């Protein structure tokens, strides 16, 4: 596989023309924004994004389904239609939506349908839930650039859909990796992913 991080630099340059107005607004406002991504188990995604400079909060939860305020057990049944997601609150003066997309596509496999590693089910699907048409356009353009460059051997199956709902997961899911460092899944799945991410994105980490 080609180096996705190196490629992302070119993608960000292509996307720059889509966000001139957005960047101007960011310079004039300190308003925090949110981004909502599904990338497999939300414990993993939360641990990664909490390390990103400019990210102020990450909440694990559920989006994309048809049941109001679902429980973890209901989501795991696959019957509610929800994906496990993380909703990321960030300062656009410090980190852009494009930067977050770069981290998103670098830290999971967007070619496996409804699965990440041993975690399988529609709740583990790859997804970008956008807040507005600008985010939709940026996400779709980024995805097209990845496909055109043949970064992956298989087609990208990432869903790009409007954010209709977001329900925070139960309290015991929040900040899971930090609070349960010795748990088996944390040791053998989350920790290696976080360590790899920190090496690859050292310049984007919180000091």
Image (cartoon, rainbow, N blue to C red):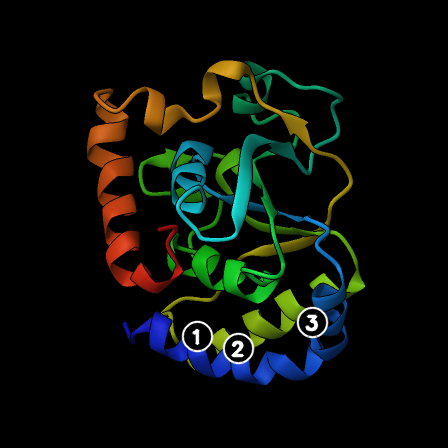
Residue position for label 3: 23
Element at label 3? helix
Estimate the spatial distance between the alpha carbons at disc 2 and disc 3, rounded to whole Å.
13 Å
Q: Nearer the viewer, mark 3 or mark 1?
A: 3
User: Which picture quadrant has residue 3?
Assistant: bottom left
Q: Residue at x 55, y 18 (%)?
A: 72
Residue position for label 2: 12
Relative image position of residue 203 (x, y in whole percent): 34, 64
**Camera-side residue of 54 and 134:** 54
Sooner in the amino-acid sequence: mark 3 or mark 1: 1
Q: Which mark is residue 8?
A: 1
Relative image position of residue 134 (x, y in whole percent): 76, 66
* Image quadrant containing the N terminus: bottom left
Relative image position of residue 51 (x, y in whole percent): 39, 46
Element at label 2? helix
User: Residues at badges 2 and 1 in contact (C-beta under 8 Å)?
Assistant: yes
């Amino acid at each position: 596989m080609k180096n996705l991080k190196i490629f992302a630099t070119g993608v960000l340059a292509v996307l720059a023309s889509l966000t001139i107005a957005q960047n101007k607004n960011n310079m004039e406002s300190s308003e925090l924004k949110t981004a909502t991504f599904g990338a497999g188990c939300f414990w993993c995604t939360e641990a990664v994004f909490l390390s990103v400079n400019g990210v102020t909060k990450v909440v694990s939860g559920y989006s994309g389904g048809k049941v109001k305020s679902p429980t973890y057990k209901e989501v795991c049944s696959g019957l509610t239609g929800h994906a496990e997601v993380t909703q990321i609150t960030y300062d656009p003066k410090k980190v852009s939506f494009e930067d977050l997309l770069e981290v998103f596509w670098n830290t999971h496999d967007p070619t496996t349908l409804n699965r990440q590693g041993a975690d399988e089910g529609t709740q583990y699907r790859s997804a970008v839930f956008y807040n507005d048409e600008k985010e939709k356009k940026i996400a779709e353009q980024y995805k097209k650039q990845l496909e055109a460059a043949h970064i992956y051997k298989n087609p990208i199956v990432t869903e790009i859909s409007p954010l209709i709902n977001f329900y925070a997961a139960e309290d015991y899911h929040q900040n899971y990796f930090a609070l349960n460092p010795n748990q088996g899944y944390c040791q053998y799945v989350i920790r290696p992913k976080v360590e790899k991410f920190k090496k690859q994105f050292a310049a984007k980490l919180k000091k």
